[in-house]
Amino acid sequence: MTNDGHTVADGQAVAAGAEALLREHADALVCGLAGNGLIVPVPQSVGLWGQGLIEGRALIDNVVAADRGTVVRLWLRVQEEGAASDKVRLLRKPSAWTTLHFIDLREIHGVLLGVIVPSDEQADGEGKLEELAPAAPRFCSLTEDEGARVLGCDDAFMEMFGYTVEELLGNSVLDQIHPDDQGRAVEGWLAVLSTGHDQQTRLRRRRKDGTYMWVDTTLRNLLNHPDRNYVLVEIIDISAEMQAQEALAEREELLRRLTAAMPVGLLHLDNERNVVFNNARLLEILFGSQTQALTLGAQDTDAGDERATNATSGTILSTLTEQSAAELDAALTEVLSDGVDKDVEVDITLPSGTWRRALMSLRALLRPNGEVSGAITCVLDITDSARARQELEQRATFDPLTQCYNRASVLSTLERELEREDSSNTGVVYVDLDRFKPVNDRLGHAAGDELLVLVAERLRLASRDTDLAGRLGGDEFLIVLREIPGPDMAMRAAQRICDALCDCFELSCGKVELGASIGVACSGEETLTAGELVKRADTAMYRSKERGDCVPVLAVT
């Protein structure tokens, strides 16, 4: 007795009941079942009386969806009681009821038995369900003597391969095996004869119409068994599985060719940041040539398909600058932990020393349950566009002649300084060159341009690293003094500038004397705009010009 009061049937009694059921219902369908519910071959020790075999992965697959709960309940009962039965409808004929029997023969025959007994009882209200045509068999068997000549076959073999019994009896079936598979077939045959152990072989068998079918073949040596004296050949049709594998291989080849031809680099990382895949273009971007891949442990089997083995992201991304590597590491951490997508621009230093910039688009790879399994990274070389962008920024920010900040950028920088809470520590030095116009008039504009370049150099040398020099236009310059304690330091800075400019300049066409009028203004405690502060410095500069002694003048607040 079980804990819930069910009686556990005796194995011999259950086997006897199964034999009686099969004798009574020769029109039934039968299959062997493993403990996990999957269909397995019916052992030869189970006597059959003309019953057909149930094909497929599991018996439940042959039952209409509404009755699959019944199948599950019967399966649980047979585990406890040794036998269970109830009515179900089959997909091939849902308009009629059948009786499904589960019988536990593991004690005697090593399998559970599934038996479906047909009936004429119609399923009320269910006749409108579409009836399916009987499925073609996927399992068959034949018997052969010690010389591999056919002794007999079942109906399923004839239906699957199209031969008649007369065409098979007494003949060897070796010529029905694909030429490329005959060596494996002979090896398996010799092994089953010499060892007596079952042998399994995957090969292609020829149908009568000349086409081939992929099958899994199991050879069982029963030559010395009483009343048998043959080798049992059990065959399972696996053509659907092989077609799926071939289709998968074709898709993999297509993907491989696509990734090899893509103009972007591809990098697949797992959760441990190990490299699962990278294409050739990635190595070209990161190292400048495919030959660098040899140092990464990558195996190049087709010059367009590198599968990096035993490589980590740190190895393959070793040419990134330190700052870019840190930024990418932070982004990758987010992608792998949170499943988000990130884009990062990185700087690369090639082994040749050349600078390169790339856009890395990181995308999380998710399993069906939402768990992150890794990341795929598309790497695009944007060096040319980055250079163009830098050039535009350069033009928008700096004066093309002197390389000082231009008028707009120096004034906007001053505005930002004045908006800070400690803007009282900001000052400006307004510089207007004296005796510059005669240089242009007498020596030409080329000499004037050369002189402006030299002036800008002296302004930078006379200023602190934190100060900013800008050209307002013509021969006027503005120096922004950051974080000064007060007007005294501003005046000392202006005096250094005055000393640097009120001097002789050596031009390519000769020496020239130059002077400068300089006005100084500080923000103090007042709230001033950039324009207001510059205007004060401009007014002070004119006072300096009126004096004419190249002495800076501090604006009056």
Image: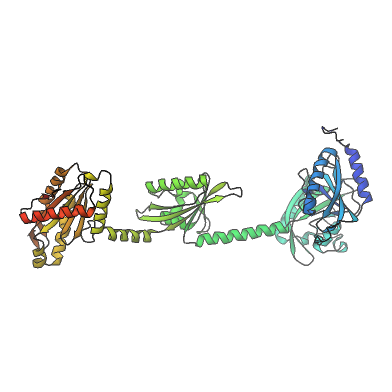
Q: Is residue 190 visible?
A: yes
Q: Nearer the viewer, residue 437 or 500?
A: 437
Q: Nearer the viewer, residue 177 or 42?
A: 42
Pinpoint residue 146: horizontal percent, then vertical percent.
84, 52
Q: Position of residue 358 (x, y in %)?
A: 41, 55
* Quarter residue 287 falls in: bottom left
Residue 512 is left or right of residue 528, and the answer is left
Q: Position of residue 45 (x, y in %)?
A: 87, 45
Q: How many marks do you count on the picture?
A: 0
Locate residue 331, reporting x and y percent.
Answer: 45, 47
In which image quadrant can residue 381 be found? bottom left
Structure colour scheme? rainbow
Q: Quadrant of the N terminus?
A: top right
- Residue visible at 20% across and 43% down in the picture: 484
Image height check: is 110 above or below 155?
above
- Height in image: 496 above or below 385? above
- Location of residue 78 with respect to 131 vertically, above or below: above
Q: Which residue is found at the position 78% from the left and 59% from the top?
A: 174
**Residue 147 visible in the displayed image:** no
Q: Nearer the viewer, residue 340 or 352?
A: 340
* Left or right: residue 182 compared with residue 153: left
Q: Is residue 465 left or right of residue 279?
A: left
Nearest the eye: 328 or 6: 6
